[in-house]
Image: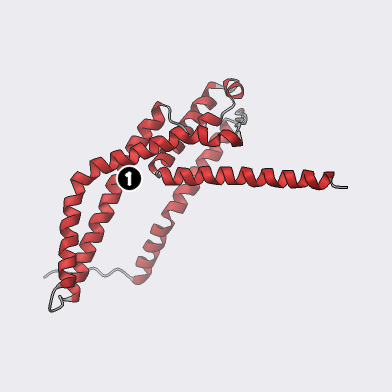
Amino acid sequence: MSTTTLVPPSTQTAAGTVSRKTPLLVSAGIATVMVILYGWLARWRGITLSIDPLHVLDSMAPLLLTSAFIERAVEVIISPWRDSGANTLESRLNALKAQTPAADAKDIHAADAAFQDYKGKTQQYAFAVSLSFSLAAAYVGVRALWPFVDRTNFNSLGASQQWMFLVVDVVLSAALLAGGADGIHSAVNAFTTFFSSTAQKAQQSADTVKTP
């Protein structure tokens, strides 16, 4: 005779709460480690970033171009591998919806769930491939922060701080590249809009001061 173990609702709720808080706990742990490391390596100085509003797009263009290439490369790799399965599941779902007399709602729901699950796994595979390409690109030199670093200030830093900055830049650049060209383009637009707005306000203030 088989037995079924019943899990109390309170235990299930607690487990669900912990699961939802996992990203927060991980982030807090990383932040704590960073604070400890900074306290240990307190001799590190600030890194000067030089940003020219007129050349932000020029500095970010390699990142945009590389991201677009990565998106295309991921599509070339994923499509032959996953598209046939997606087409089969979608066709089955559409056939059930168009069936006369109407198909059982449970069958339609099951077909839709299988299709959505397949698409979700495809997105996960695509992200893994994209992140791999992005890490490789960032590793060889396609960086987000490096174009804005003041070289004189950077060269005066200690070797450990320079190394750590490059590691952070590689990770950040890979995340941006994996996010796609649209995300980087949005960041560039935010930069240019902010600087344009700041320049206009400064000009208005200067005109106001000059007005008798």
Residue placed most toward the observer, 173 or 52: 52
Asked if residue 4 shows in the view, the reply is no
Classify residue 35 by image quadrant: top right
At horizontal 38% and vertical 69% (from top left) the residue drawn is 10
Kindly state the secondary structure of the residue where label 1 is placed.
helix
Q: Position of residue 99 (x, y in %)?
A: 14, 73
Residue at position x 20%, y 75% from top?
A: 105
Spot occupied by residue 195 in the image (x, y as percentages of width and height) = 62, 42
Residue 72: name its quadrant.
top left
Dot 1 amino acid type: Phe
> Residue 39, relative to residue 207: is it above or below?
above
At a point 61% along the width and 24% down the height, the residue shown is: 153
* Image x and y of residue 79, in percent: 22, 46
Q: Which residue is mark 1?
A: 127
Report how many numbered discs are placed on residues in the image: 1
Residue sitting farthest toward the front: 212
- Residue farthest along the left direction in this orientation: 1
Relative to 170, residue 97 above or below = below
Whole-percent x, y for residue 203 in the image: 73, 44
- Quarter of the N terminus within the rendering: bottom left
Model colouring:
secondary structure
Tell me: residue 172, above or below residue 8.
above
Q: Say above or below: 12 vs 186.
A: below
Q: Is residue 179 left or right of residue 41?
A: left
Of residue 23 and residue 192, the one placed in the foreground of this image is 192
Callout 1 crowding tier (Cα within 10 Å): few <14, some 14–19, many ≥20: some
Residue occupying the point 16% across, 62% down: 91
Q: Residue furthest bottom?
A: 101
Specify whether residue 25 is in view: yes
Between 108 and 212, which is closer to the camera in this rendering? 212
